[in-house]
């Protein structure tokens, strides 16, 4: 999560599909709400389940958000027991929000279970950083307590007790996309898996953008894309999400937040947020999938430090594209599909936001690549030792559970700095 939202105490959110969480039924929420130290005046807007798309959002108090029938309130003691007292060997990762621990709960009673039994969950524990952290925590509860989609991570419940703020999610055994792309592991992601991840993430964004009341994710990046056991992608961390513009408005004006290298240039420069800001971020992640390089890499020299700047000259050239393709793929990718994906990334990264495609168009293009069949052909060829008809890069070859990176942070305007920090 980021460490700052805009100064307004109201945050718009959207609902286009309600669904029960992975946990099933809800328990009485009185045990946690009574001990909340958060201001009672904080309200977040919501939308009625039967919204006709033209109705205005109705205010939602903190109490209403926390009493969602789709979420289960937990006591701090329950989560402490579920994670074995937040022991170091239960730690999955650390981010700007706080620490993430692996835990076990009973699927029926939602009480702590013995390790290896019951439902495996991921428990995120907020660092005590004051009111702003609470607002982002509440924003995430509000969104994930209402929105349900196969490509959004499931929020099972929460804990709000005194200064303790925790979130309980479904456990994603393959961790984050960031881990698989950038950290040394036994097996690099194949081309087919990379396209499967891109398609899943695109479906998640499309769902948010096309909700009855649009949601702008605002922090789309590799570390926020989590993978289940079959490498299905799910978007996580909704602390920076914002409701899209309504009526005749073309954008939402907000304090600039995001992660260096992923934020759209016009948003950084003006603070004007649209769904096309997410499309730009998707283009950056698509480049990361193609190249195996981070959006920003200070270990590189010159223009190669910025992935977008480095790759742009090659994306539209079939003969030069191999120069930016991930060497860990060892040439095992279909040239035509790679070029289509590169061209799509280039469109997403257009300096003019209006020229970027919608996520619906992005998804349709990716689905046409027929990634599952490509993955099957690659797997079968590898097992049989039959070479594929592919492009082998002449460049030399270089030779994971949930781990989080530092979260998004306020980004200065281009008007005051040429760099995004």
Image (cartoon, rainbow, N blue to C red):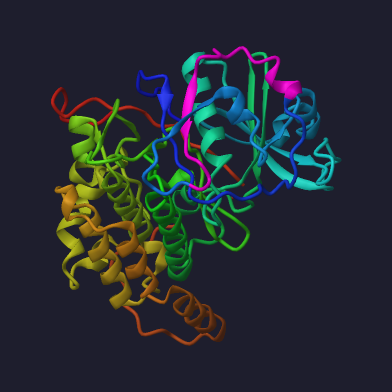
- Name the spot of residue 31 as percent of width and height, x first: 76, 22
| Residue closer to the observer: 94 or 226 | 226
SS assignment for the magenta stretch, majority: loop
- Kindly tell me whether residue 396 is visible in this rendering: no
| Residue closer to the observer: 345 or 166 | 166
- Name the spot of residue 100 as percent of width and height, x first: 62, 34
Question: Is 130 inside the magenta-drawn segment?
Answer: no
What residue appears at the point 50 percent right and 84 percent down from the top-left corner? 381
- Name the spot of residue 104 as percent of width and height, x first: 78, 41
Tell me: residue 290, above or below residue 9.
below
What residue appears at the point 54 percent right and 27 percent down from the top-left corner? 138
- Kindly tell me whether residue 214 is visible in this rendering: yes
Q: Which region shows up in magenta?
A: 30-50
- Name the spot of residue 24 as percent of width and height, x first: 73, 47
| Residue closer to the observer: 82 or 46 | 46
- Residue 100 relative to residue 411: left or right: right
What residue appears at the point 32 percent right and 74 percent down from the top-left corner? 337
Tell me: residue 307, above or below residue 361.
above
Question: Is 32 inside the magenta-drawn segment?
Answer: yes
What residue appears at the point 67 percent right and 39 percent down from the top-left corner? 69
């Amino acid at each position: 999560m980021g460490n700052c939202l805009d100064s307004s105490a109201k945050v718009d959110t959207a609902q286009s599909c309600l669904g029960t969480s992975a946990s099933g039924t809800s328990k009485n929420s009185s045990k946690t709400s009574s001990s909340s130290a958060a201001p009672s005046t904080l309200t977040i807007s919501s939308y009625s389940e039967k919204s006709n798309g033209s109705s205005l959002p109705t205010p939602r108090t903190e109490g209403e958000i926390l009493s969602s029938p789709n979420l289960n309130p937990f006591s701090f003691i329950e989560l402490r027991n579920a994670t074995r007292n937040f022991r170091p060997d239960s730690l999955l990762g650390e981010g700007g929000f706080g620490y993430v621990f692996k835990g076990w709960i009973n699927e029926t009673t939602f009480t702590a279970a013995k390790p290896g039994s019951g439902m495996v969950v991921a428990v995120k524990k907020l660092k005590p950083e004051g009111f702003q952290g609470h607002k982002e925590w509440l924003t995430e509860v509000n969104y994930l307590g209402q929105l349900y989609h196969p490509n959004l991570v499931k929020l099972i419940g929460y804990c709000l007790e005194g200064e303790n703020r925790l979130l309980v999610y479904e456990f994603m055994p393959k961790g984050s996309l960031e881990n698989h792309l950038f950290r040394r592991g036994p097996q690099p992601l194949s081309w087919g898996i990379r396209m499967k991840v891109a398609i899943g993430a695109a479906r998640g964004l499309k769902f948010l953008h096309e909700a009855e009341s649009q949601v702008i994710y605002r922090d789309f990046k590799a570390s926020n894309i989590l993978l289940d056991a079959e490498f299905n992608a799910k978007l996580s961390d909704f602390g920076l999400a914002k409701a899209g513009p309504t009526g005749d408005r073309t954008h939402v004006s907000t304090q600039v937040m995001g992660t260096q290298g992923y934020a759209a240039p016009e948003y950084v420069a003006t603070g004007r947020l649209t769904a096309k800001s997410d499309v730009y971020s998707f283009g950056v992640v698509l480049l990361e999938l193609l190249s195996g390089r981070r959006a920003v890499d200070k270990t590189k020299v010159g223009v190669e430090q910025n992935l977008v700047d480095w790759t742009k000259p090659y994306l539209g050239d079939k003969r030069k594209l191999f120069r930016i393709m991930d060497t860990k793929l060892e040439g095992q990718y279909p040239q035509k599909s790679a070029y289509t994906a590169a061209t799509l990334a280039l469109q997403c990264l257009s300096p003019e936001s209006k020229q970027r495609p919608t996520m619906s168009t992005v998804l349709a293009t990716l689905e046409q690549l027929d990634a599952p069949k490509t993955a099957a052909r690659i797997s079968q060829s590898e097992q049989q030792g039959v070479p594929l008809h592919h492009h082998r890069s002449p460049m030399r070859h270089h030779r994971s559970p949930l781990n989080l990176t530092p979260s998004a942070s306020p980004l200065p305007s281009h008007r005051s700095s040429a760099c995004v920090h």
